[in-house]
Each structure stands twice: as structure tokens, then as C-alpha cells.
Image (spheres, rainbow, N blue to C red):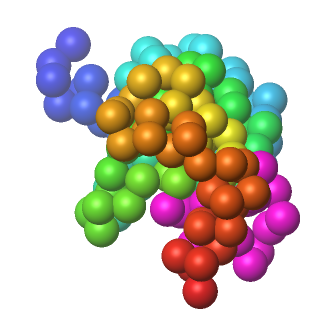
Amino acid sequence: MSSSSSSSSSSESSTGLFDAIRSRNLKLVARLVKANDPATCGETDADGQSALHIAADLGAIDIVTLLVGARAAVDARDKNNWTPLHAAASSLHQSAENLDIISYLLDYGTSHGESERASERLRVSRVSRVSLALMCVY
């Protein structure tokens, strides 16, 4: 198989994954993640957003946890240098589940040693972290 064919099928699988996330179809997302190379979770759209960015922005906590479990990078950055955490915080007004996503991503980062900065967040209480995220949005 040529590299252009591989690139094309990779692009098609990420487009399908992104569409499944946008339609909040958890079963299809799970099937696509399982059927494709786990690297699919790291592919990005034209704005540099990964599947995790999109799920976090939508407030889809079930899809966020599935993607993180499939090793999606919680510290991936899009073209605006935003992480999925930023995406969740910026869409807080759209979905109350975004508070759960914010807490989940912060907790995940600190418990898995994503960065030194993440470990510093561990010292901040859960309420303070959510309050901080709210202040960053507004």
C-alpha cells in the first residue's frame, strides 16, 4: 500500500471518528477507536484539534473517558495552543458536564505525571480548580 493510500484511509478514519464524537455516538466512537490504530486518537482536524479536544468541547464526559483510556494525549495542543482542558473550560456555559471533564482531566494529569505543572495542581482543592477554570472562561 502506498503512503498516499495509507494517509487517505487514516484521514477517513479520523473524519469518521470526529463525526461520531460530534453526534455523541459512544458505541461508534468505541468501535472506531478499537478498530483503528490507537494513534487515531492523536490525529487532528484542520484547526489542530484532536478527538479529545472535540469531546471535551462538547461536554461528552463518556467519550472523554473512553479516549483517555485509549491513550489520547490529555496535553495535546491545537493551533491556538489550547489543550482539551482549555476546550472544556471555554465551553462551560454549554454543558454542566464540562465541570466533570475539567476535574477529570486535572485529576488524570496529576495522577499520571503528565507534567510538573500538573503535579502542582494536585495541591489545589477540587473546588478551587473548578473555580479557577470558571474564572479563566469569563
Q: Choose between 12 and 53: the one closer to the eye.
A: 53
Read off the magenta span: 86-100
Q: Nearer the viewer, residue 133 or 128?
A: 128
Judge left or right: residue 110 versus residue 27. Answer: left
* Residue 137 place in picture, x, y as percent: 57, 79
Magenta-colored stretch includes residue 2: no
Residue furthest to the bottom: 138
For image coordinates 59% across by 78% down, the residue present is: 135
- Residue 15 percent location from the top left of the image: 49, 46
Q: On the picture, is 108 further left or further right than 116?
A: right
**Which picture quadrant has residue 106?**
top right
Please state the horizontal and vertical placement of residue 53, each as a whole percent of the image: 51, 52
Up the image or down, 123 lies above or below 85; here it is: above
User: How many numbered discs, if any?
Assistant: 0
Residue 51 lies, with reference to residue 113, above or below; the image says below
- Using the image as rendered, state which of residue 36 and residue 70 is in the foreground: 70
Q: Is residue 20 visible?
A: no
Q: Is residue 92 magenta?
A: yes
The x, y position of residue 16, in whole percent, is: 56, 41
Q: Is residue 130 in sight in this rendering?
A: yes
The residue depicted at 33 percent of the width and 57 percent of the height is 78
